[in-house]
Amino acid sequence: MRALQFSRSGPVSNLRLVDLPDPQPDEHTAIAKLAAASISPGDVKNVEGKMDNMTLPRVPGRDHAGTVIRGPEYWMGAEVWGTGGEIGYTIDGNHAELVSVPGRKPRTLSLQQAASVGLTYLAAWMGLIEYAQVTGEETLLIVGAWGGVGGDAAQIDRWRGARVIAVDRHALRADAPAAPAVDEFFLLETKTFDTIARAATARRGTEVVFDTVGGPMFEPALNALAPCGRQPVIASAGDRRVSFDLIDFYHNESRLLGVDTRARNAIAWAKHLDALGPFFKQGIFQVPQIERILALADRVADYQEVTSGQPRERLALAS
C-alpha cells in the first residue's frame, strides 16, 4: 500500500509517500480501504516531534473511515470508522491506503463525514461528560470555539442543557454546526475571556471552562472559574509549562481535569463511537463542514496548511 511516513521528527516536509506492506486482519480488527482521513493539529505536532511516546518510522493520522476488504465474512463490505490513542504514534496511522479498524460507522454519516468527527467529539465528550460532568443548570465557557473540539463541545453542552459562552480570535460563522448551540459568542480582541466570563455571569464566573488551547490561555481560563468550578484541559499551545496563583486557586476551590485521548486504544474508542451514532442519526449532533477532499499524494501540502492555524475544516482522501 501507499502511505505517508516520516523517519525523523521535524518539519512536515519530512513526510514521504512510500510503499509499505499491507496490514493484516486479526481476531480484533478488519482491514479497510480508506475513503477518508482527517488531518488534525495533533497530527502535525506528531510529525514535528512534539508528542510523547511516539516511535519511528511512523505513518501518522488518527481519524478515519473506509470499507472493509479483509477480515471476518460478516464484516466484508461494512463501512467503518475509528480513532485511537495508539494510532499514528506506536502503531501506523491512517494516512495511507489501508488501515486496521475495530468499529462500524453510523449509516447516516458519509465516509467523509465519519472521518472528520471521531477524535474531536470523543475529546469533548470525555472532558465534559465523563470528567467535568456538566449539568443543565450550569454555564460553560469554551476557549477556542472555532476549533473542532470546541465546536463539538458546544453541541454536547447544548444537548446537556447548559448555557454556552464561547470565545475565539476568529468570528464564528453562522453556518458552522456549533453556531446554533452557542448562547453568547465573543471575539478575543480587547478583552480577555476571564473578563468576558465574569461580565456575562454577574461576576460569578462559569462553572466549567473547557480550555482547548492551553499555554498562554491557561491562567485566564482558570481565573474565569466560579467557586468550585472545573477546568478540563486537553492541549497546551506553545510552552507546555504554565503558572498560576496557587492561593487564588485553592481559595476558589477550583479543580483541574487532565484529558488525554491517547490513554484509550482504538478498541476502547470503538465502543464510544458506537454510543455516539444515535446522536448523529437523530440530528442532535452535526458534523463539521468539509472544505476540500485531497488525494493522498497532496497531504504534505495540507499538513503545511494545518500548521498555519487557520479556522477551517479539511479532509484528505486516500487514493
Image: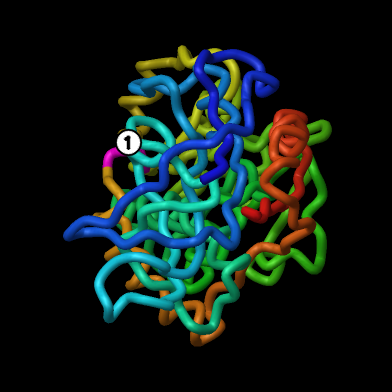
Residue identifier under label 1: 255
- Residue found at x 59% / y 17%: 238
248 and 101: which is toward the camera: 101
199 and 43: which is toward the camera: 43
- Residue found at x 66% / y 55%: 317
Percent from the top left, x then y, of residue 314?
71, 51
- Residue found at x 72% / y 50%: 295
Give the quarter of the figure containing the C terminus. bottom right
Residue 12, above or below 191: above
Residue 240, above or below 99: above
Q: Which residues are magenta?
A: 258-263
Q: Residue furthest left?
A: 27
Whether residue 271 sits left or right of residue 117 in the image: it is left
Percent from the top left, x then y, of residue 260?
35, 38
Whether residue 197 sits left or right of residue 299 in the image: it is left
84 and 18: which is toward the camera: 18
Question: Badge 1 local density, few (<14 within 10 Å), some, or many (20+)?
Answer: some
In which quarter of the view is residue 170 placed? top right
Secondary structure beneath dot 1 equals strand
